[in-house]
Each structure stands twice: as C-alpha cells, then as structure tokens.
Image: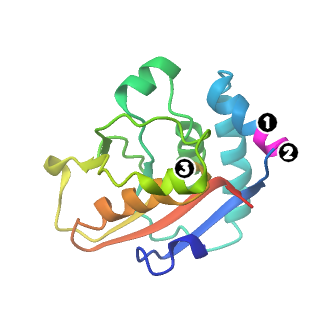
Amino acid sequence: MHKFYGKVPIEHASSLLLYSKGGMIQQLIHNLKYKNHPEVSFFLGNIYAHQLSHTNLLTDITAIIPVPLHKNKKKTRGYNQVDGFAKAISTHYNIEINNTLLIKTIKTSSQTTKNRFQRKGSKKEVFEIDQTQLTTEDNHFLLLDDILTTGNTLESCCKKLLQIPNTKITILCLARSI
C-alpha cells in the first residue's frame, strides 16, 4: 500500500475491505471494537483467509503478529479486536500466532476522534520488542491490524520488528480508509 512507500520496507500490504465514514464497514468495525463483538474479527478473517488461498502470499510466513493493545486497554475491552483475525489466518494456514514478541508499552488515546495531522503528531515510541524471544533465524512476520488509516501504528510496529536481524514483514488489515 502506498502509505508505506519510502517509510518502511515491507514485502506486501493489503486489506480486505474499504472503510468510509458512515458506511457499512464503519458500523462493522465499530461493533467489533466498541460493542463487544469480537466474533466479527474471526468471521472477516475467515473470508480473507479464503481469498488469500488463491495466492502464494503467505507461503513463507514464520509467525503472525497481531498489533498489540496496551494491557490496560485490553483489560477494559476484554479482548484484542485483531485476535479473531489472527486465529482465522493461523487456522487456515497453520502459522503460529505470537502475541508476546511485540508489546505496546504506552497507552495512547483513541485515534478515531483525531484528524490526520493530530494522528501524525505523536512521535512517541509506544511499541517494544521482547528481547528474550530474539533468534538468529530468518523471520517473515505477518503483521495484522483491524483498520489502516494513516499507517502510523503499523509503521511504528514495522520499525520495531525490523530491528530484529533477518526480518521481513507482510501486512494485512481487515479494512483501510478511503
């Protein structure tokens, strides 16, 4: 996707759906994140997994990395909205999910009420790598998120993951903004 050109080297990035304000996809994602419907993530993940089965895009993926939530946010919500998506892809392709390699260390406010400039303004490093999990093996991580808007969150995640030697990244999102 063009949002990452010149920012971080990725192998591939794509999304299943297009998100527009006031549209059906916005309602679906809103139900997933704020109305306690984590099953939406697994449902959409299964659809995406089926579509991807017609490609060889995920053949050399070594681990699935869902974009992590801060522990307080996960406790409040009760789930990470990307976990169902990760489980669907994992089940379909028999790829391990690693929920502990990438850690969100700083709780940030919701991006939904911020404009593009406010979203870009935050330059704090909010993600860290669990150093105890580092290996010298080649890694090709599949980084998953629910929605891509500015790309800041995924860019931050990629920058941290790419600090691990011999690492490549592919990104999949359930939806992306128009």
Residue at image position (62%, 31%) is: 33
Q: Which residue is mark 2?
A: 23
Going from the N terminus, do you reach mark 1 or mark 3 first?
Answer: 1
Residue at image position (54%, 74%) is: 12
Nearer to us of marks 2 and 3 is 2
Residue 117 at x, y percent in the picture: 54, 56
One can see residue 143 in this view: no
Report the magenta stretch's main SS.
helix
Q: Which residue is mark 3?
A: 145
The Cα–Cα distance between marks 2 and 3, rounded to whole angstroms, is: 19 Å
Start and end of the magenta stretch?
A: 22-27
Q: Which residue is mark 1?
A: 27
Residue 26 shown in magenta:
yes
Pointer 3 local density, CA inside 10 Å: few below 14, some 14–19, many at least 20: many
In which quadrant is the C terminus drawn?
bottom right
Secondary structure under tag 3 reads strand
Pointer 2 local density, CA inside 10 Å: few below 14, some 14–19, many at least 20: few
What amino acid type is highlighted by mark number 1? Gln
The Cα–Cα distance between marks 2 and 1, rounded to whole angstroms, is: 7 Å
Pointer 1 local density, CA inside 10 Å: few below 14, some 14–19, many at least 20: some
Residue 28 shown in magenta:
no
Residue at image position (51%, 26%) is: 79
Residue at image position (53%, 36%) is: 110
